[in-house]
């Protein structure tokens, strides 16, 4: 859990994000620039909240789920719960951390799976890739670079 908190501590602040997504079905590429604000938990050490994220009008909270964690082959794996302002339904995500600079998320929404990997190239440059699958077939991929401002 310390590596996850360390990752979000490094992530706190305001970032400019440039994401390019390629949809395989129609062979179209889209690019989007946005800003992200990441705030670490300001509560007590026993708080379940890890961080709050905001992309424009969208906000999410990342919440610990300490009942479901494991240490396998040197990787810390556990489940996180995500909430957002538009939907009270919580999404459970499998999270793996290999070191304080690399984190992966695997999220399922029915028959759709999203695999995301985030890593720090430098202290103020964070990169990520996403693979979106429906019924185990890849339908889209994306690459994102984020610069801390």
Image: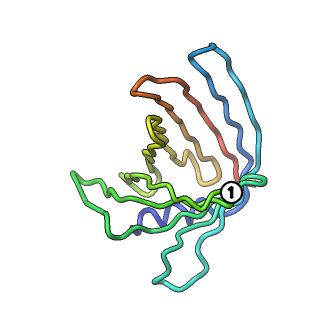
- 107 shown above or below 140: below
Would residue 107 be found to the left or right of residue 30 on screen? left
Residue 88 in the image: x percent, y percent? Answer: 60, 62
- Which residue is most to the left? 73
- 15 shown above or below 10: above
| Point 58% across, 15% down: residue | 25
Q: How dense is the environment of label 1, judged by Cα within 10 Å: few (below 14), some, or many (20 and up)? A: few
| Point 63% across, 59% down: residue | 84
- Which residue is most to the bottom? 44
Which quadrant is home to the C terminus? bottom right
Residue 82 in the image: x percent, y percent? Answer: 53, 59
Residue at mark 1:
86
Q: Nearer the viewer, residue 129 or 121?
A: 129
| Point 29% across, 53% down: residue | 75
Residue 108 in the image: x percent, y percent? Answer: 44, 43
| Point 35% across, 59% down: residue | 78
Q: Toward which corner of the image does residue 12 lie, by quadrant?
A: bottom right
Residue 36 in the image: x percent, y percent? Answer: 71, 53
Q: Nearer the viewer, residue 74 or 106?
A: 106
Would residue 46 be found to the left or right of residue 122 on screen? left
Would residue 29 be found to the left or right of residue 5 on screen? right
Q: What element carries label 1?
A: loop
């Amino acid at each position: 859990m310390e590596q996850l908190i360390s990752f979000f501590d490094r992530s706190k602040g305001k970032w400019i994000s440039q994401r390019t997504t390629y949809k395989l079905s129609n062979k179209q590429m889209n690019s989007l620039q946005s800003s992200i604000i990441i705030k670490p938990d300001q509560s007590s050490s026993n708080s379940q909240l890890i961080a709050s994220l905001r992309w424009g009008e969208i906000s999410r909270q990342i919440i610990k789920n300490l009942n479901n964690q494991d240490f396998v082959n040197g990787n810390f794996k556990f489940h996180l719960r995500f909430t957002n302002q538009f939907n009270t339904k919580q999404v459970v995500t499998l999270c793996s951390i290999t070191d304080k600079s690399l984190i992966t998320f695997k999220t399922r929404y029915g028959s759709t799976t999203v695999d995301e990997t985030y890593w720090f190239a430098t202290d103020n440059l964070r990169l990520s890739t996403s693979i979106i699958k429906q019924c185990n077939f890849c339908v889209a991929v994306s690459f994102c670079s984020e610069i801390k401002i």
